[in-house]
Amino acid sequence: MGIGYLCANFDGMEFSIQGSDTKSSARAGTIITDNGSIETPIFMPVGTAGTVKAVHQRELKDDIAASIILGNTYHLYLRPGTDILTEAGGLHRFNNWNRPILTDSGGYQVYSLSARRKLSDEGVVFQSHIDGSRHRFTPENVMDIQRMIGADIVMAFDECTPYPCDYGYAVRSAEITHRWLDRCIARFDETMPLYGHQQVLFPIVQGSTYRDLRALSAETIASKGASGNAIGGLSVGEPHEVMYEMTQLVCSILPFDKPRYLMGVGTPANILESIALGVDMFDCVMPTRNGRNGMLFTSEGIINIKNEKWRDDFGPIDPNGLVFVDCQYSRAYLRHLFVAKEMLGSMIASVHNLGFYLWLVRQAREHILKGDFASWKNETTPRLMQRL
RNA sequence: GGGGGAGUUCCAGAGCGGUUAAAUGGGGCAGACUGUAAAUCUGUUGGCUAAGCCUUCGGAGGUUCGAAUCCUUCCUCCCCCA
């Protein structure tokens, strides 16, 4: 890849707001990228290793109607590696997804693989979870790798601050993330996209659960004038009220006219609450991972499909679901697949859960445009979160 | 017909005189999972009027302070030789 330069003020992404709720900070917008547009609020299925686990692209597009998916820098760098990705012509062509992609930077792995890495101001040295080999990640090469992956939205390299976390650590962690951000921006700005579509860089707010640090971090991030801004370091074990408090605080500081992305969140309730606080974008492994483990989110509540009670329930998985699996397979059949450890069970559950999550954010958008989002959210959430 | 082996809690299978309601798997039941080291992990799995008691290791007797473990006998199954 060559070192190039960008036209001043060029923004590879547009964001517009079509409407907002009357009794909350929820808004309905549209993000336009070179690979397609995204109506917000949006849920982005996680496709860490270049695949939304157990789901075909065809299902993602036609049934689930996902408008953007994730990839992960750390995982794709280790496998298949940047040589294969560039040879393929980028991740879009490699995994046959012609809509937008967002790549996480590996900042979450700084947290989740903390036992396997050494963090310094320079960057992070990871010991591969695959073969133990050592790999240095810096703000600079993380930008380069994300250029080679070719995501439409790339994330700044950060440290997802753990929880609980003492104040001193939270300060140092946020400072590292901020220093890294400047290096990310510098490198990103001096390099060019490789595959003919524009890319944008989202910075990430940290600050753990401390209001002053969150505010400081949000102001720092906001000052960069990025195309969109992310909130990281939440949903790592803190109480929900704390997560909402931090989200509300940060949203009040981040620019109104740019999309806000709450990383790693969450449950259906988390998502609706955060939309009300002004968040536009979400991603979470919950619908796929929990789906593979037998947990179904439905319009009627939450189901553990492995439970004996579904053994002879021949009703649809979700009578109100819009995805083809919802009405074509029974709960009894899906339970059988899980009990028998048949892989189709994981596939059906993943398609269903993602279909449900995308349905949920589409509903949210409709109610925001109608102006009754807050009341709809309050009456809907208890039903969605009840255990069946 | 002759010789040998085995029957243990839902299943397989340890245990071979007391620390055994009985290892370990599996199965069953339940729980967890939030920018994916996860098609993963954890708990539990005889009964009860539960810090205690009752029933349980093919059946019935017996030895012993004490038996799933030793003896007698019966039943059932498996293998080898005719």
Image (spheres, coloured by chain):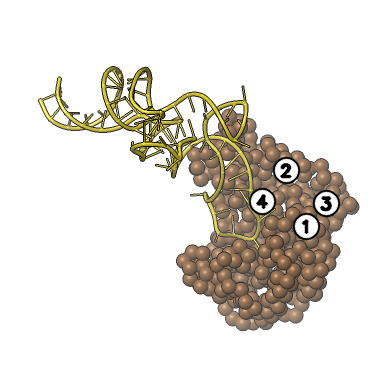
Chain colours: A brown, B yellow
A90 horizontally vs A259: left or right: left
Chain letter behind tag 1: A
Is the C terminus of chain A in the top left, top right, bottom left or bottom right quadrant? top right
Q: CA–CA distance between discs 1 and 4?
A: 32 Å
A62 horizontally vs A29: left or right: left
Is the N terminus of chain A in the top left, top right, bottom left or bottom right quadrant? bottom right
**Pointer 3 residue:** A368
Residue type at mark 1: give it: Val
The answer as to whether the residues below labels 2 and 1 share one chain is yes
**Pointer 2 residue:** A385
Residue type at mark 4: give it: Ala
Place of residue A174 in the rendered image (x, y in percent of width and height, measured from the top left): 72, 72
The answer to whether one can see residue A128 in this image is yes
Disc 4 element: loop
Which residue is located at x 78 percent, y 74 percent?
Answer: A220
Point out the frontmost of discs 4 and 2.
2
Residue B11 to residue A106: above or below: above
Q: How many marks?
A: 4
**Pointer 4 residue:** A65
Q: State which quadrant residue A111 falls in.
A: bottom right
Q: Earlier in the sequence, mark 1 or mark 3?
A: 1
